[in-house]
Amino acid sequence: MTITLLYAGLLSLWLLVLSVRVIAIRSQGISLGDGGNPVLLRRIRAHGNFAEYVPMILVMIGFLEISHFSALWIHLLGGTLVVSRLLHGYALSFNESFKFGRIGGTALTLTLLGVCGFLCIYQALVTH
């Protein structure tokens, strides 16, 4: 499962960046919630959105790799996940006006969620 490990490692570094950005504002005295701070709210949502989607998609990519799905497809799925999360995370955590990043990142992530789901079903039916 070395391909999925690569993408899990890359994504963990991005999660670290998003986490540090939340902590940086929290260290100014907002220990819980967003304290009405719109910048903190955006950073919390960038971090939270990552945590909501990435684990499930990575699990599906890993299952596909374990089931000997095409390595090219595994790289395509993993690379798309990295790009989608970079776009979305940057748009929410670093920039208020990068609408393409937010919309594009969301669209790619949701497409990837669906594609991975269908590929997992396909792979389960074909290999059973």
Image: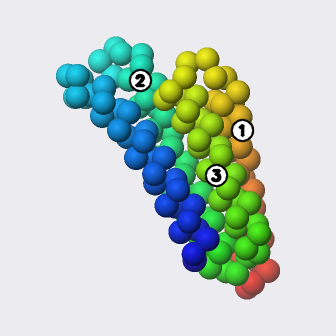
Q: Horizontal and vertical percent for residue 90?
A: 55, 33
Place of residue 117 in the rendered image (x, y in percent of width and height, measured from the top left): 69, 60
Q: Which comes before the other along the chain, label 1 or label 2?
A: 2
Query: Identity of the amino acid at label 3?
Result: Leu
Q: Hey, which quadrant is residue 29 in on the image?
A: top left
Residue type for callout 2: Leu
Q: Is residue 123 visible?
A: no
Q: Dot 2 lies on which element?
A: helix
Label 2, on which residue?
41
Identity of the residue drawn at 53% across and 69% down: 5
Which class describes the residues within 10 Å of circle 2: few (<14), some (14-19), or many (20+)?
some
Mark 3 lies on residue: 81
**Which of the 4 image quadrants contains residue 71?**
bottom right
Q: Residues within 10 Å of mark 1 (few under 14, many from 20)?
A: some
Verify CB contact (< 8 Å) between mark 1 and mark 2: no
| Residues tagged 3 and 2 counted as in contact (Cβ below 8 A) | no
Q: CA distance from mark 1 to mark 2?
A: 21 Å
Q: Nearer the viewer, residue 78 or 54?
A: 78
Q: CA distance from mark 3 to mark 2?
A: 23 Å
- Determine whether 111 is above or below 118 in the image: above
Quadrant including the C terminus: bottom right
Choose mark 3 or mark 2, whichever is in front. 3
The residue to which callout 1 is attached is 107
Q: Residue at horizontal 35%, vertical 32%? A: 22
Sequence order check, earlier mark of 3 and 2? 2
Q: CA distance from mark 3 to mark 1?
A: 11 Å
Task: Residue at 23% x, 28% y: name it.
Answer: 27
Give the answer, above or below, for where 37 lies relative to 43: above
Q: Amino acid at mark 1?
A: Ala
Question: Judging from the image, what secondary structure is the residue with disc 3 in?
Answer: helix
Q: Residues within 10 Å of mark 3 (few under 14, many from 20)?
A: many
